[in-house]
Amino acid sequence: MSYGPNLIYRENRLAGRARRIVDVIVAFALIVVTLPIVAAACIAIFLEDRGPVFFTQARAGRFERMFTIYKLRTMKREHCGDRPSPTTSSDDRITRVGRIIRMTSIDELPQLANVILGHMSLVGPRPEMAIIMRKYEDWQHLRHLVTPGITCIWQTTCRKTVPLDRPEATALDLDYIRRASPMLDGALLVRTVATVVFPKGAF
């Protein structure tokens, strides 16, 4: 399979503004609805492993501009930082509470604040760490033409089997950029909800 840079991208500014409005409205509504869940998770994190309940890390946004991403902390304090994320549920860096939070994807909810701040969109390629991005082939940087998102095609299809830095994952991101539309975004959001409700194979 070829993963070459065969991508023609033309920005529709009107559609971009409409998308931004929808992102902010939906993100704000989700923050209000999920606030009790996040609060309960924060208490559980603190009770098990005293320390910060939020995890922050520098990630690459649109045009490779760096921003701070927010997540609930699922790893032990001493293992947080710019290191590769756990890829299995048996990773001993993950706390007991963290395993539950990761399985249900609750740790991703603080990224709704990133959406409000304009760093991210609800749907778009997942933002990656700079140390990983530096290993990309030239064509893989095309994924940074658009604003990164909380969910994407990779997130809803193969995030447990294909690492985000792999060419196969980038090919899915470029496919999304080619076909981006409100209908596709809606479908991906529905799939995301389904994977949270039925977290088969999640960790």
Image (cartoon, grey):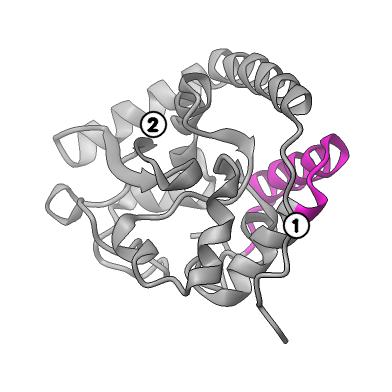
Q: How many marks?
A: 2
In the image, residue 114 sits, relative to residue 138, either above or below, namely above
Identity of the residue drawn at 78% across and 45% down: 180
Choose the circle earlier in sequence order: 2 or 1: 1
In the image, residue 201 sits, relative to residue 70, either above or below, namely below
Q: Which residue is mark 2?
A: 41
Q: Amino acid at mark 1?
A: Ile
Q: Residue 65 vs residue 144: left or right?
A: left
**Residue range (magenta):** 178-200
Residue 31 in the image: x percent, y percent?
Answer: 54, 18
Proximity of marks 2 and 1: CB atoms separated by less than 8 Å: no
Residue reaching furthest to the bottom: 1
| SS at mark 1 in the image | loop
**Residue 183 sits inside the magenta stretch:** yes
Residue 8 in the image: x percent, y percent?
Answer: 75, 57
Q: Residues within 10 Å of mark 2 (few under 14, many from 20)?
A: many
Tag of residue 111 = none
Res. 136 image quadrant: bottom left
Res. 132 image quadrant: bottom left
| SS at mark 2 in the image | helix
Q: Main secondary structure of the magenta part?
A: helix
In the image, residue 190 sits, relative to residue 30, either above or below, namely below
Residue 150 in the image: x percent, y percent?
Answer: 56, 41
Q: Is residue 157 visible?
A: no
Q: Which residue is mark 1?
A: 8
Q: Nearer the viewer, mark 2 or mark 1?
A: 1
Identity of the residue drawn at 66% across and 69% down: 171
Alpha carbons under labels 2 and 1: distance apart: 42 Å
Q: Amino acid at mark 2?
A: Ala
Q: Residue 39 vs residue 30: left or right?
A: left
